[in-house]
Amino acid sequence: MDEWNELKVQLTNLSEFIDLAAMEGDENLLSEITSEITNLITNIEGLEFKNMLSGKDDSKNAILTIHSGAGGTESQDWAEMLMRMYLRWAEGRRYKTTIVDLLEGDGAGIKSATIEIIGDHAFGYLKAEIGVHRLVRISPFDSNKRRHTSFASVFAIPEIDDEIEIDINPADLRIDTYRSGGKGGQNVNKVETAVRITHIPSGLVAACQSERSQIQNKTNAMKLLKSKLYQVEREKLEAEQDELEKNKLKIEWGSQIRSYVFHPYNMVKDHRTNVETSDVQGVMDGAIDNFIKSFLLQFSNG
């Protein structure tokens, strides 16, 4: 409310300043008035921005998961392109990222990836990316140079902190170790340092292979599992309160939220907001803030 009241004072002062300039007929004040208006608009947009990121978990770090769709190598390559896009976006915001689990594709790309993204309001932003992402391009894997359509799904959950307690019965867990599938230090592919934890009652699975130590991987996998369980419980509560369905869009194959067209023209279009751009390369390099902000302004519960 303090910021809102400050904006009201700023608007009142500006209105009086404009009236005074009009009475005096002083056109020399026009540039100063224009500057003040621009400043006021910026402050209003900033307050709107804070409002759309005021959800319960918006301020938290995010756990982003990407899965390739049907289509083998094509979709796996697309999933890897999306992973790079989000890593570049996070880098631009100076967020810290860790690829905690990665399942490489058959020959190219990735089948899935789980990324921990640490930064102010990371989940608040990335909840706008949840859904199916569609790519249309001339396939680099097709010797006949035909146009292909590929799909990949993106999902984000808030990373819970130590202040939130999630009770897990150790008897409900199955813990498996395996050799890491990625490139890394001398222990990789020699020692079973990777850890996969299955919560038997819910069927939820969390895995981590980013650390060299099995103990560290187990700790991180448990943190991921707790975040998933927390998200499930929160969604149940919201459904009971009839909050979940207010602005929730279906996340399923065939209901893509955004299309990335590389051929026969260049365009990225968000089907929820109709925001689009021809700067395909910029988007793939992480320039997705315009899509995120437009979605949050229209659909955020606040």
Image (tube, grey):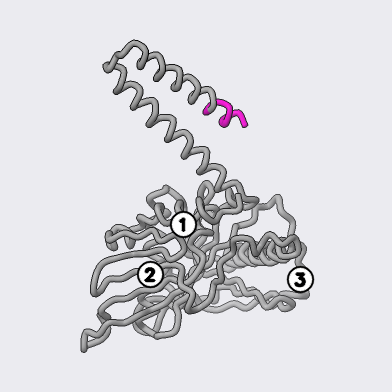
* Residue 24 visible (yes or no): yes
Residue at the image point whose x is 78% and y is 69% from the top: 169
- Give the class, few, some or many, for how many residues have Cα within 10 Å of label 2's Cα (few <14, many ≥20): many
Q: Residues within 10 Å of mark 3 (few under 14, many from 20)?
A: few
Magenta span includes 239: no
For image coordinates 58% across by 68% down, the residue present is: 214
Three-letter amino acid code at the position of disc 2: Ser
Question: Which residue is label 3 attached to?
Answer: 170
Return the residue at label 2.
Answer: 259
Distance of label 1 from label 2 (alpha carbons): 25 Å
- Magenta range: 1-7
- Nearer the N terminus, badge 2 or badge 3? 3
Q: In the rendered image, which quarter is residue 25 located in?
A: top left
The quadrant of the rendering that contains the N terminus is top right
| Helix, strand or loop for disc 2 | strand
Q: State which mark lies toward you, 1 or 2.
A: 2
Q: Is residue 225 left or right of residue 97?
A: right
Q: Which mark is residue 97?
A: 1
Q: Is residue 54 left or right of residue 141?
A: right
Name the mark nearer the viewer: 3 or 1. Answer: 1
Identify which residue, 234 or 225, lies in the foreground. Answer: 234
Would you say residue 100 is visible in this rendering?
A: no
| Residue 91 on image: x %, y % | 39, 52
Mark 3 or 1, nearer chain start: 1
- Up/down of 103 relative to 163, above or below: below
Callout 3 touching callout 1 (CB < 8 Å): no
Q: Secondary structure at mark 1?
A: strand
